[in-house]
Image (cartoon, rainbow, N blue to C red):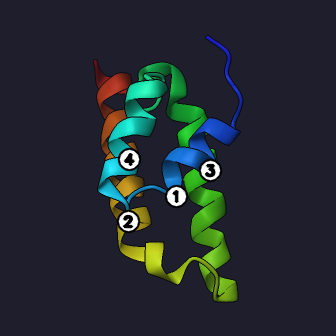
Amino acid sequence: MRYDVWVEYLGAYTPLQPDSAVRVRAAFPVLGSPDGLAAEATVCAQLLQTMSRGDNLTLEGPLRNWSEELRRRWSAERCG
């Protein structure tokens, strides 16, 4: 399945707006799916990297939680 990475960015910026997050995940079911794992990991890493420049600091907690979730999903997929 192919989709644009901008969908991941859209999903990444919604944790502070729970209603928006629900709507984005409903509109783009690939978010959270095995097919989206690589794109999610890429976007998460890029956003975590921006924090070293002082950007996206309000997303630090949600981004770190997301990165842990991605690690668990990746491990689960590899170990079956």
Does label 3 or label 4 sit earlier along the sequence? 4
Residue kind at label 2, given as amino acid type = Leu
Residue closest to the far top: 1
Residue closest to the far bottom: 54
Q: Give the residue drawn at x 58%, y 47%.
A: 10
In space, the residues marked 2 and 4 are separated at their CA atoms by: 8 Å
Residue kind at label 3, given as amino acid type = Val
- Residue 16 — which label? 2
- Give the quadrant of residue 70: top left
Q: Is residue 18 left or right of residue 45?
A: left
Q: Which residue is mark 1?
A: 13
Q: Which residue is mark 4?
A: 21
Q: Give the residue drawn at x 67%, y 74%.
A: 50
Q: Give the residue drawn at x 64%, y 89%.
A: 54
Q: Secondary structure at mark 3?
A: helix
Q: Which residue is mark 3?
A: 43
Crowd around label 3: few <14 · some 14–19 · many ≥20 (10 Å) = many
Please identify the quadrant where the C terminus is shown: top left
Residue kind at label 4, given as amino acid type = Ala
Which-is-in-front pick, marks 1 and 3?
1
In space, the residues marked 4 and 1 are separated at their CA atoms by: 8 Å
Q: Is residue 6 left or right of residue 66?
A: right
Above or below: residue 35 compared with residue 58: above
Q: Secondary structure at mark 2?
A: loop
**Badges 1 and 2: C-beta atoms under 8 Å apart?**
yes
Does label 1 or label 3 sit earlier along the sequence? 1
Q: Give the residue drawn at x 36%, y 73%.
A: 61
